Image (spheres, grey):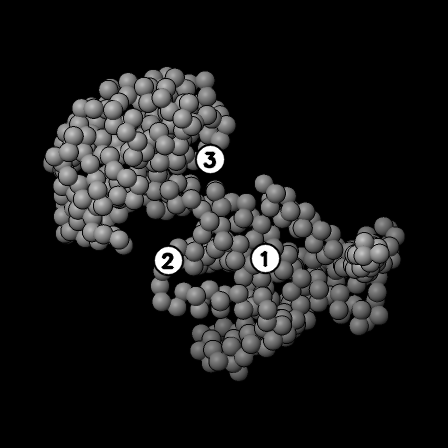
């Protein structure tokens, strides 16, 4: 369970979110500029809240006195434009988080290989990310975030970087892949079709205010 | 009519740049060139220039990289002032730089007494050559690095952090590799500027063979002494270094 209760003064309006995210996908919908990325950055530790706290499976990530740095949070994040490392190939991108954890090269290779198999991009392992299609990039970004066995998963508009033709197909793939992920997952989107694809749990963010009752 | 005028203007300036270079290159036969470069004075200056430019480049990379990062990313009072100050040596006349260094670090300079108390004398030593080079040449690297760090996609660094890399490893594994071509181009420009450094060196370090007589100073001394062959041969080497520099920088800019 991911428990978020934070406040942060943004330039245009105060941001306040209170939400308990159970294992599985929770979709956060809202117009652009409503503070969706802010929510994810707060949870990832890329932003500090002015007040409040974040807990993950009982572990305190931040409150008034404590702040766990993003590199110690074990939270996987898929960025809006995927933020893949352009100077590294697919395998090195996916293995990056394992390298950060000092995992031996042989085990790293094995775990990356398993992940690439699961995401059906094994034949692209030596390819630089610039040569990949949008759908492939998205899978690399997801594989990179999941290979570290994160305690939570954050997806920032995971389909918005794709062209409309690919989007529908990749949405189906993403839906199937996320069904196998058993950790609290926040997926933010402004796209109604994304919301329809993950109907189980939907919350709405409006001008920095997260209303957990919406559905 | 206008096209002809443009063509003539362009050709005149290009010729003006090419003719002196050609005059240098055509002055000596290859045999004379090699013989002149093998004189003890030329070999000593070559060695000293290689040594001092490598040291000044190393100092620039070591101190200039953190400075460039701070200037590109940090927000502190006086940042714009520091930013401007760092660029000042680019426009200060080298002789003025030499005088400034002398008045700061020379025996009777601002920091002369404390340095003397520590048993350190900088002016008219090889260390003074390095200081003069760092002073005039480091801004080229800092400018290039600052631009590269400012232009870097900070989402990539954020991604690295969420994957568990601390700030130092993120800098080494993400920021530097992505800024690599710009950093390399800036380093090459700094090295080339240090290699050609003359005014600051002669004012602050003197013109002593084996101590402070780098290649440009040797050109000046040999010409004064009427030995045009050695002066020309050393100049050819420096022009070759400049051309290689430009080629490398151009290649990296195109990537």
Badge 1 local density, few (<14 within 10 Å), some, or many (20+)? many
Q: Which residue is mark 2?
A: B74
What subunit carries mark 2? B
Looking at the rendering, in which quadrant would you find the N terminus of chain A? top left
Judge if badges 2 and 1 mark residues of a common chain.
yes
Q: Which residue is mark 1?
A: B190
Give the CA separation, mark 3 to mark 2: 25 Å
> Looking at the image, is B160 positioned above or below residue B1?
above
**x and y, in percent, of residue B100 in the image:** 56, 76
- Compared across the picture, whether B40 is left or right of B76 comes to right
- The answer to which image quadrant residue A138 occupies is top left
**x and y, in percent, of residue A42 in the image:** 23, 44
- Compared across the picture, whether B96 is left or right of A148 comes to right
Judge if badges 3 and 1 mark residues of a common chain.
no
Q: Nearer the viewer, residue A15 or B128?
A: A15
Looking at the rendering, in which quadrant would you find the C terminus of chain A? top left
């Amino acid at each position: 369970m991911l428990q978020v209760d934070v406040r942060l003064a943004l330039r245009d309006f105060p941001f306040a979110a209170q939400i308990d995210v159970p294992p599985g996908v929770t979709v956060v919908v809202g117009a652009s500029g409503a503070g969706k990325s802010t929510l994810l950055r707060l949870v990832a530790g890329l932003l500090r809240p002015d007040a409040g706290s974040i807990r993950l499976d009982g572990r305190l990530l931040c409150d008034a006195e404590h702040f766990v740095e993003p590199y110690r949070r074990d939270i996987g994040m898929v960025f809006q434009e995927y933020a893949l490392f352009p100077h590294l190939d697919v395998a090195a991108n996916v293995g990056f988080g394992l390298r950060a954890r000092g995992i031996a090269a042989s085990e790293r290779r094995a775990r990356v290989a398993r992940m690439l198999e699961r995401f059906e991009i094994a034949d692209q392992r030596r390819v630089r990310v610039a040569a990949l299609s949008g759908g492939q990039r998205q899978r690399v970004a997801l594989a990179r975030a999941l290979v570290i066995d994160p305690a939570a998963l954050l997806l920032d508009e995971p389909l918005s970087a794709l062209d409309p033709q690919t989007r529908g197909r990749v949405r189906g793939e993403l839906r199937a892949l996320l069904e196998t992920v058993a950790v609290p997952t926040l997926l933010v989107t402004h796209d109604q079709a994304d919301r329809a694809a993950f109907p189980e749990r939907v919350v709405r963010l409006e001008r920095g205010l997260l209303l957990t009752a919406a559905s | 009519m206008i096209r002809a005028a443009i063509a003539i203007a362009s050709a005149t300036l290009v010729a003006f740049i090419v003719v002196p270079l050609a005059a240098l290159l055509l002055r000596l036969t290859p045999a004379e060139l090699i013989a002149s470069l093998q004189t003890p004075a030329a070999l000593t200056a070559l060695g000293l220039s290689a040594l001092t430019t490598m040291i000044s480049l190393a100092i620039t990379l070591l101190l200039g990289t953190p400075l460039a990062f701070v200037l590109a990313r940090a927000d502190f009072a006086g940042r714009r002032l520091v930013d401007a100050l760092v660029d000042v040596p680019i426009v200060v006349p080298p002789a003025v730089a030499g005088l400034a260094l002398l008045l700061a670090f020379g025996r009777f300079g601002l920091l002369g007494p404390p340095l003397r108390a520590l048993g350190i004398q900088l002016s008219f030593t090889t260390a003074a050559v390095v200081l003069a080079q760092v002073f005039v040449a480091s801004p080229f690297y800092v400018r290039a690095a600052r631009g590269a760090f400012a232009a870097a996609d900070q989402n990539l660094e954020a991604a690295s952090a969420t994957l568990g890399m601390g700030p130092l490893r993120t800098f080494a594994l993400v920021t530097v590799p992505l800024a690599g071509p710009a950093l390399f181009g800036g380093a090459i420009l700094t090295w080339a500027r240090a290699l050609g450094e003359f005014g600051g060196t002669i004012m602050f370090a003197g013109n002593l063979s084996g101590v402070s007589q780098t290649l440009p100073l040797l050109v000046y001394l040999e010409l004064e002494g009427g030995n045009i062959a050695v002066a020309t041969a050393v100049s050819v080497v420096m022009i070759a270094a400049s051309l290689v520099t430009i080629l490398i920088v151009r290649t990296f800019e195109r990537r």
